[in-house]
Image: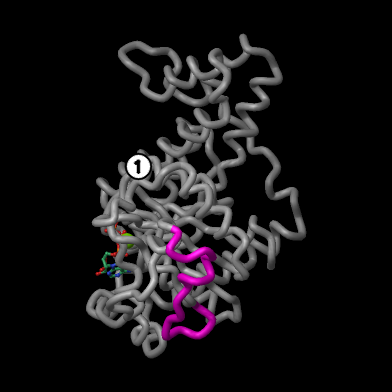
Amino acid sequence: MDDIKNKLWAIGGGKGGVGKSIVTLMVGASLARLGNKVILVDADLGGSNLHTLVGIRYPKYTLADFINKKVEAIEDVIMSTPIENMSIICGADDILGMANPKYTQKTRLLNHLKRLDADFMLLDLGAGTSFTTMDFFLYAPNKIVVLTPQITSIQNAYGFIKASLFRHLNDTFSKESGPLELIKRACSPVNGEPIDSIAKLYDEFKVLGEEQQENLMNCINALNIKLIINMVKDTKERNVCKIVKSVAKNYLGLTIEDLGIIQFDNILNSSINNMADFFTKRRDSMASINCYDIATTIIKNCQKITTQPSVFAAPKIPA
Ligand SMILES: Nc1ncnc2c1ncn2[C@@H]1O[C@H](COP(=O)(O)OP(=O)(O)OP(=O)(O)O)[C@@H](O)[C@H]1O
Ligand SMILES: [Mg+2]
């Protein structure tokens, strides 16, 4: 499974504490258990704690060593974890000013990451919508947004998805003033602004010609976002996914996939200090079972991507 399209997954979600790191770890461990070589990357530069969850107290090497060129190859900062088949690249501490690496540093990092020998690489992103977080999220061909059923988390997840879409549009049309002007208006519609959805932006693009309309649609369709609802407590909360999907479709023209739910799990919550132990000994816990199911779905998804390119067929922008 060498294909970068299958390999690289970014896990983001706007809000802090929704379980991005837990999902990275648990889904990563499930993929490893299913026989895949997995590398977790703590891309929460400035607020890294993924290593703590796998039981590494003081990482010997971190991304900072690579970013500051203390080591030449990214392979030099990979550390093993107690989980077979799964290793980790620990995050950098903000004391070193790593939260906002320079463009060239980010590009070098991403170029080295993509060449790593792994079946899956999972990037654990920080909270918020900083440029660095957005860049990592947009770079990964597979994007997961984690949210909980809480209203604030739903709002932040939507905000995160919207911010990533508009950054993606801005990047794509960065050298074209006509499209950029329209994108800017759609991004923050002020009082009475008629372009208040992607469908209307698409209509406005008509004046720029059919080719630009098609470029806009291709750009939107290229954003391959999937949702995981974490800390689900009852059946009603499972429907949160439908709400986010429908709002994203109606206002942003995005077709978002549902990757699954993870139930609120008391055993997990009280095992945070020893997640590796939890993972090996509590495979029967609800969260472990849910994450295993999600890993299975991811693998099926990758097989589909490899064998049926038609899954990328362009969904229509809503009328
Ligand atoms: N399914 C779950 N069941 C019970 N508790 C959970 C679950 N998922 C996460 N938690 C709890 O939520 C806490 C926060 O999780 P986590 O650190 O993964 O969030 P995060 O989104 O990565 O936060 P940050 O943005 O600060 O990096 C965990 O320490 C754990 O106590
Ligand atoms: Mg985290």
Q: Position of residue 254 (x, y in %)?
A: 53, 38
Q: Residue at x 43, y 13 (%)?
A: 194
Q: Position of residue 84 (x, y in %)?
A: 50, 85
Q: Residue at x 70, y 17 (%)?
A: 210
Q: Nearer the viewer, residue 171 or 294?
A: 171
Q: Residue at x 35, y 42 (%)?
A: 129
Q: Where is mark 1, residue-wise? A: 130
Q: Is residue 257 visible?
A: no
Q: Position of residue 189 (x, y in %)?
A: 37, 19
The reply to whether the magenta stretch includes residue 215 is: no
Q: Quadrant for residue 192, please give it.
A: top left
Magenta span of residues:
69-86
Assess mark 1: CB under 8 A from ligand 1?
no
The vertical placement of 34 against 233, above or below, is below
**Disc 1 residue type?**
Ser
Q: Nearer the viewer, residue 24 or 195?
A: 24
The vertical placement of 36 against 48, above or below, is below
The reply to whether the magenta stretch includes residue 70 is: yes
Secondary element type, mark 1 = loop
> How is colour applied across the structure in the image?
one colour
The vertical placement of 177 against 239, above or below, is above
**The N terminus sits in image quarter:** bottom right
Local crowd size for mark 1, using a 10 Å CA cut-off: few (<14), some (14–19), many (≥20): some
Q: Nearer the viewer, residue 80 or 123?
A: 80
**The C terminus sits in image quarter:** top right
Q: Ligand 1 quadrant?
A: bottom left
Determine whether, in the image, residue 133 is placed left or right of residue 111.
left
